[in-house]
Amino acid sequence: MTADYVNGLFGLDGKVALVAGASSGIGAEFARALARAGADVVLGARRVDRIQKLADEIAAETGRKTLAVALDVTDEDSVQAAFDEATAKLGTPTIVCNNAGLARPNWALEDTEEDWDVTMNTNLKGMWRVARAAAKRMIENGKGGSIINTASILGLGVGPQQTTYATSKAGVVHMTRALAIEWQRFGVRVNAICPGYFVTEINDTFLASDLGQRMLQQSPAKRAGKLPELVPAMLMLASPASSFTTGVALPVDGAHSVRLA
Ligand SMILES: NC(=O)c1ccc[n+]([C@@H]2O[C@H](COP(=O)([O-])OP(=O)(O)OC[C@H]3O[C@@H](n4cnc5c(N)ncnc54)[C@H](OP(=O)(O)O)[C@@H]3O)[C@@H](O)[C@H]2O)c1
């Protein structure tokens, strides 16, 4: 009975989910979790060998259908092609984890125009491209859906050497709110997850450094998050349990973002 109740709220049986940036870190963890919760999963990224291997592993573990599609979020044609392939092979994705991102930490005076352009084109415009491609198909499908943007606590506050990254993620938070309002009438919910620090390829060198270790020690939890600790917030936003939740930017950060001193 309890399992039925929980599954009725959070289960994803019969859904198709797409994860952008599924080849490592948070996106790989999300793809695994979505299949474990019952969804068929499309994994998108540029490193196709990695997502193909992961797709095979997830299918073997969960028995769900999986599909690896080449996806470069900086290229509109690639985004459209990935959604077309996903829709043709597995059906319209009604859960989309919009997660592709990169970081080039540096002092603002050292940043180049190329650093700014690549960061914005991936983290902000890339998420805009994926969100629009997803919503268009959800609306055509007539069933709506849930888009979950991976923002960051650096979209809520700022840190050293993060001017460009933090600005891109603040843009993601605000875009999430704007799209939530605009697409509510179509039944498309748009929310953001704002992770604190989780060790992945984007930050493993920094977090292992003296500076990174000091930063973690000064955070309220005194540690990085573990990837499975990020999953339940995503599953809640993906599932029918959050049918009245849209336009939210949800920190999952051990209170890192609320500490003032
Ligand atoms: N780890 C953290 O502490 C943390 C905290 C806050 C927010 N985030 C955000 O979480 C998201 C995932 O990062 P992560 O920590 O899991 O780092 P990661 O392991 O480096 O993963 C980044 C993912 O983004 C993909 N990606 C990058 N550029 C892409 C492009 N042009 N087109 C398609 N995919 C692209 C990468 O795939 P390919 O290289 O194979 O294309 C990879 O799958 C990012 O948006 C990041 O900003 C992370």
Image (cartoon, rainbow, N blue to C red):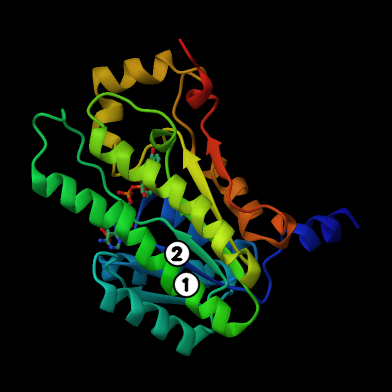
Q: Residue at x 54, y 27 (%)?
A: 254
Q: How far is the residue under mark 2 from the one under mark 1?
A: 11 Å
Q: What's the residue type where badge 2 is placed?
A: Val
Element carrying mark 1? helix
Q: Are marks 2 and 1 in contact (CB under 8 Å)?
A: no
Q: Is residue 49 above or below residue 175?
A: below
Position of residue 201 measured from the top left corner of the image (x, y, whole percent): 29, 44
Query: Which amino acid does the dot numbered 1 rest on?
Result: Ala
Mark 2 nearby-residue class (10 Å; few <14, some 14–19, many ≥20) = many
Q: Relative to residue 165, is residue 5 depicted above or below?
A: below
Q: Which residue is mark 1?
A: 134
Task: Residue 4 in the image: state x and y as whole percent.
Answer: 84, 61
User: Mark 2 against mark 1, which lies toward the viewer?
Assistant: 1
- Residue at image coords 54%, 84%: 91
Which mark is drawn over residue 19? Answer: 2
Q: In the image, residue 196 lies at what x, y percent?
A: 45, 33
Residue 33: x and y in percent read 56, 57
* Picture quarter with the C terminus: top left
What is the secondary structure assignment of the residue under circle 2? strand
Q: Which of 7 and 164 lies nearest the eye of the viewer? A: 164
The answer to whether one can see residue 197 in this image is yes
